[in-house]
Amino acid sequence: MIVGETVIGLAVAAAVDPVPWARSQMAFTLAFHIVLVPLGVSWAFMALIANYRAVRHDDHDALLLAQRWSKYMAVTFAVGAVTGTVLSFEFGLLWPRFMGTWGDAFGVPFAFEGLFFFTEAIFVAIYIFGWRRLKPWTHFWTGVPIPVAGVFGSISVVAANAWMNAPGGFTMNANGEITDVDPVKVIFNDAMPLQATHMVIAAYLVGGFLVASVYAAGMLRGRDDRYHRLAFTIAFTVAAVATPIQMGVGDALARWVFTNQPVKFAAIELVPTTSSDVPERLLGKLNPDGKVTGGIPIPGLASWLSDPSTGRSTVVEGLNSVPADERPTVDETNIVHLAWDVMVGIGTALFLLSVWYGVIWLFRRRMPRSKWFLRAAACSGVLAVITMEAGWIVTEVGRQPWIVYQRMKVEAAATANTGVWLTFIGVFVLYAALGVTLILVLRGMSRRFRRAGGFVEGDTPYGPTEAAAADEVETAEQVEERTP
């Protein structure tokens, strides 16, 4: 009986297709980790803005804000390091055939990312421990390498993903083995400039809205002091400046996709057959019979946006321009199109919110104070994260079935281990624990900071340490004893 059950169990395990599980695990871990990336890239920059204002203008609230933000930043950086490490192992565990074939080229950008990561970690430690040990301007400059390293680290990772969209910089022999790699061409591939710029600006946009949303919620609860207004202003201004820039970069990137990945573009715009005067369809879906139904079509707009020089006569290649096994499935196409609509729709709403903020600031020199603005700002963080996630869905699902565009398909890259579903469960539990712990720690720190009312350390930043203060007191008492 036991032997029979064992045989049945092994048969069931052998029947498990590892490819969907590998894709699901990678998607889940990337979706989780990408939320921490904007904080790692932009929070240090915002803390430095507060730090600069504190030192330059002797601003106590800004100094308090910079100190607290640096501690929040350290926590999110630590959690991001854990989730990023898991992702690194997943490339080998989930995609061994991909790494076996393309690892020599794909691994080049990650080597540089490792250097930037360690640089960032070193200066995070120096900056935090330097609050009471360094002079104000010296301490400020020790924080500058943190956002710089964060930006270049993100560029390195995105360069690897961009290489998957535009592979190059390598030479292969007749056996399909890489014999030579040009690191410069691998990193600076055709997709890298726009894709990396898009992600870095997204980091500042999402990070700014995320941080600002917390203080907007606080102000709605009655915490309308200068400290909260300053925190909101710094974070929201960073996001508001990044938003219109992001829309311009996103438009340029969409046109790059139109030119270089026409099948992905067809999925984005729901174009089943090659044609001109293609409408921009809001929502809607592709049916298995190849017909598009539902949604709101705007005549000719997709063609015009693709190439304004030819306008509505611009020809857009359809999904049928390639064989069925070289394009996204119907379900994948609908996912890509919906994600595109979500990204563009919410991005436009955040842009309008930024315009509202900018107009009030321009004419009244203060942030908007209406309840409706604060409610919208309190939602902006979650909405910005949804927008970023939707953008990555467009990028990754739109490239299907290719893991390396027109070079290797996902099925040929994935592990053959049928037990991969067990690692998915393990990673899910680990990330869930990390997420809950992160939220609890940040909330606990916030409550402790509010109860303290000021600096939570025994010593004031940029002031004398306790030992030095004790020495000064002792010296004063000695002088007093010697005084007749």
Image: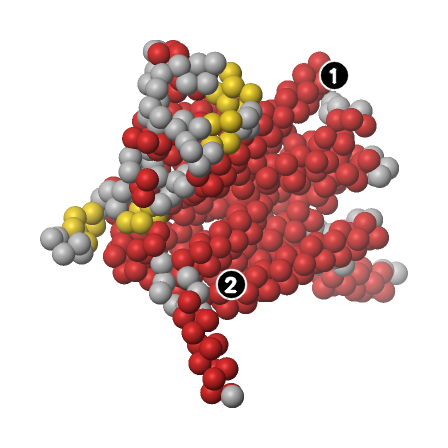
In front: 332, or 158? 332
- Near mark 1 (Cα within 10 A), the count class, few <14, some 14-19 or many ≥20, is few
Q: Nearer the viewer, mark 1 or mark 2?
A: 2
> In the image, is residue 298 above or below residue 215?
above
Whether residue 202 is visible to the viewer of this picture, yes or no, is no
Picture coordinates of residue 304, whole percent (x, y): 41, 15
| Residue at mark 1 | 364
In front: 131, or 268? 268
Q: Residue at x 47, y 41 (%)?
A: 331
Q: Residue at x 76, y 63 (%)?
A: 470
Picture coordinates of residue 46, whole percent (x, y): 61, 39
The answer to which quarter of the image holds residue 223 is top right
* Amino acid identity at mark 2: Phe
Whether residue 264 is visible to the viewer of this picture, yes or no, is yes
| Residue at mark 2 | 424
SS for dot 2: helix
The answer to which quarter of the image holds residue 345 is top right
Cα–Cα gap, marks 1 and 2: 52 Å
Q: Residue at x 57, y 47 (%)?
A: 35
Picture coordinates of residue 20, whole percent (x, y): 44, 56
SS for dot 1: helix
Relative horizontal placement of residue 377, taking residue 178 as reference (left or right): right
In the picture, the quarter occupied by the C terminus is bottom right
Relative horizontal placement of residue 193, taking residue 238 as reference (left or right): left
Picture coordinates of residue 121, whole percent (x, y): 51, 56
Q: Residue at x 65, y 40 (%)?
A: 382
* Amino acid identity at mark 1: Arg
In front: 3, or 175? 3
> In the image, is residue 46 above or below residue 463?
above
